[in-house]
Image (cartoon, rainbow, N blue to C red):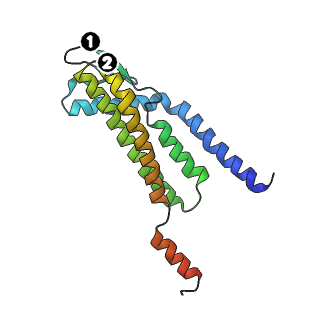
């Protein structure tokens, strides 16, 4: 095995390892924070039927159904995607650290905002219907939306990270001596 292969294996191991360990350490406090942000957001909008968080659960009191607790499960949290973008920025991608940080911040911001929107929409459906309505919306629309915004975050990440065609053309022209 040559040095390059070992470097790649180490960088991949760090990327996966740090993401997994950080996810395990941060998961419960992060989900609690997400639940608090969502409940406070519902309270600010005057939707008192979902304005109380208990750990990583939000009490949902529908207009015409039995109250229930909506749980922000590990797979519903934005944490995994955000940590993945962070680890990729730290260990896999090379180049200007400021550009990597900006790409991470853009992708993480998009994923976080869209995830709040996805969970918020699911809870809103639960407020208007019941626990079954929330579940169906979450499982179908929420999952599709989740996939799309993670792909959108990755696209934004690459767009911010990679140089523009104009910059590449300038570098090419400079390398050829300005001809």
Q: Which residue is mark 1?
A: 66
Q: Verify CB contact (< 8 Å) between mark 2 and mark 1.
A: yes
Is 139 rendered above or below residue 109? Answer: above
Give percent across and percent down for residue 76: 43, 30
The answer to whether residue 118 is left or right of residue 151 is: left
To which residue does mark 2 refer? 131
Residue 173 on image: x %, y %: 53, 81
Does the image show residue 51? no
Q: Residue at x 77, y 55 (%)?
A: 3
Q: Determine which quarter of the picture holds residue 172.
A: bottom right
Q: CA distance from mark 2 to mark 1?
A: 8 Å
Q: Secondary structure at mark 2?
A: helix
Q: Is residue 39 in view?
A: yes
Specify which label sits upstream in the sequence, 2 or 1. Answer: 1
147 to the left or right of 176:
left
Q: Residues within 10 Å of mark 1 (few under 14, many from 20)?
A: few
At horizontal 80% and vertical 55% (from top left) the residue drawn is: 2
């Amino acid at each position: 095995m040559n040095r390059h292969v070992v470097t790649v294996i180490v960088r991949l191991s760090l990327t996966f390892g740090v993401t997994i360990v950080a996810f395990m350490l941060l998961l419960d406090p992060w989900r609690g924070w997400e639940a608090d942000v969502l409940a406070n957001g519902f309270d600010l909008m005057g939707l008192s039927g979902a304005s109380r968080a208990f750990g990583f659960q939000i009490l949902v009191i529908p207009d015409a159904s039995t109250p229930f607790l909506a749980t922000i499960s590990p797979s519903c949290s934005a944490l995994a995607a955000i940590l993945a973008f962070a680890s990729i920025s730290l260990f896999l991608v090379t180049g200007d650290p400021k550009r990597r940080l900006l790409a991470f911040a853009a992708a993480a911001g998009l994923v976080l905002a869209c995830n709040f929107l996805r969970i918020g929409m699911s809870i809103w459906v639960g407020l208007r219907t019941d626990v079954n309505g929330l579940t169906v919306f979450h499982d179908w629309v929420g999952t599709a939306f989740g996939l799309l915004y993670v792909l959108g975050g990755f696209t934004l990440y690459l767009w911010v990270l990679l140089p523009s065609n104009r910059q590449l053309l300038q570098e090419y022209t400079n390398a050829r001596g300005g001809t």
